[in-house]
Image (tube, grey):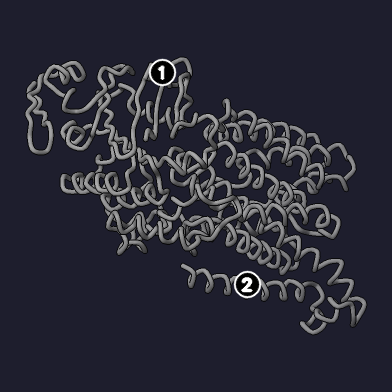
Amino acid sequence: MNKKFLISLTIIIFLLIINSILSLAKGSVYISVEDIWLAIIKQGEEINQTIIWELRLPRLLASLLVGSSLGMSGALLQGMLKNGLASPYLLGISAGSGLVIVFFISFGLMQSFIPLAAWMGAILTTLIVFVLSKDGNKIVVERLVLGGVAISSLFGAIQATLLLQVEDGRIQAALNWLIGSLNARGWQEINFAALPILIALFIGLFLSRQLNLLSLGDELSMSLGNSLFRSRCLIGAVATLLTACAVSIGGLIGFIGLIVPHFSRLLIGNDFKYILPFSALIGGLTLSSADLISRLGPIEIPVGIVTALVGAPVFMFILYKKTGYKK
Amino acid sequence: MTNLKLENFYAGYKNNIVVKNINLSVKSGEWLGIIGPNGSGKSTLIKGLLGIIKSVKGNIYLKDKDIKILTNRRIAQTISFLPQQLNVNLNITVRDLVALGRSPYKKFWEFNLNKGDVEKINDSLNLVDMYDLKDNLINQISGGQCQRAYLALALAQDPEILILDEPTNALDLKYQIKFLEIIKTLKVNRNISVITILHDLNLAARYSDKIIALKNGESIGYGSCNELINEQFIKNIFDINALVSNTPYGKQIYPVN
């Protein structure tokens, strides 16, 4: 396993470097690798420095942070709920932050507060879902999932009602958040979310043993000294923090959190010690690649559309491969 | 030394006390068999004493210490439990599964196995004859091998008490005996206490030093197999007529009607 791990890790890091260079080079103005380097160390042409420092670098960092958050968050929740269909948005995060975003946009409230408000919406909704799923000192997994579904449909209905009342110009802005986009994301969003994301990613890596124990089943997991309540709360909290931060930067970017953990599992097996770091790395790689694709055409399309367009067929392929007839 | 003691123990679910007023004790190197018909509370008794479901009242003493003051990890360093339902679809190697048995000894941030851990894991794999299969995936080995891999996981916990809920269910006759013989050897060599739920009364009578019989959640017999098992006792528990004979392998029960 270690050899496989090292080879896969090397390939992913290599791809990440290539993709990062391409992301910094490509755009309406092409910048050569040499000029990128000069601009990064704040030398060379001023226009290049502005493009790299103000536009492309923060956007690249945003895509890496958001992608790795969604990747790891998906892996954490799929492991905790023992359900391959769990995505980071399952526990009502999309509904909570989506509603807040639509609320802010439809009433024309301070737009610069949208990231913070989306973050709070996500955290608050998940908190409600967790409280609803608590039974004594237990977290009932079925209630957690169903609570998420119920809250999502409730908030979704309010969100749709608000959207119907909004004037046309604002719908575009709302959709940009609801589909997910990294367009015009800058240092402000990154400064707000980077530290909590990095801390949560770091803590997340230490949750592999808890997830491995949970995969043995509740009874055996408990008899190995694992507190189900504590580990579910901790895993849920880290996953929620990651997703909320990701949403505060890029809106509701779909499919990364659902597919990336499956892909990691195919690549490296079912040990969460490897799945968690791989999901974060592959998540970052996938989203930064998708973002690169989203701005290659004459008109930029929201990255959420690219992840869904590419993600859905990939997901179907994985499903087919996992459940189909094998010779 | 008494490893485990239950006093006036009640356990169950909300508004439904399943197990009532159980008193028992298990010493080092002693095998306790729990027998009884379906729904008599055997699994609930085990889950209650492990804290998987809440005990309603009564006391549990683990090596003379009240279990309430012990942490989950401390309990897991003393008791290993193999439940009835095992996840056989895991896509991890046998060795990685067995390594999870060292979890109770690991702190939150401790990832790596030390030399002592590796020794325990290898010992456990050797004891259940699974060392050569250590790199195979759990979902690609047979049911019997899987059962032994999980036993190795329980042994890697280095327990003083081993609790097994119907451990021979998935095994053929040969492996039933082989599996129970491994546990018997462990009991003798390591002086551990063993608690099993066995549906096969002949196996229960052959391996247990003493038994507790449950019916409707209450104990209707507790003592050594030789003293307890007779035709009337079987009739009381299972409502069937049976012949009981003495054999070199202990009491054997033949159901008649």
The reply to whether residue A256 is visible in this rendering is no
- Residue farthest to the front, as pictured: B1
Classify residue B38 as left or right of residue A261: left
Q: In this figure, which residue is indicated by the disc labeled 2?
A: A13
Amino acid found under the numbered disc labelled 2: Ile
Whole-number angstrom distance, CA of label 1 to CA of label 2: 61 Å
Q: Nearer the viewer, mark 1 or mark 2?
A: 1
Residue B209 disc label = none
Answer yes or no: do the residues labelled 1 and 2 have beta carbons within 8 Å? no
Q: Residue at x 58, y 74 (%)?
A: A10
Across and down, in percent, residue A182 comes to 76, 58
Check the image and report above or below for A248 versus A10. above
Q: Position of residue A200 (x, y in %)?
A: 69, 52
Chain at numbered mark 1: B
Of the numbered discs in the image, which one, if any, rests on residue B8?
Answer: 1
Under circle 1, the secondary element is strand
Which of A218 and A64 lies nearest the eye of the viewer? A218
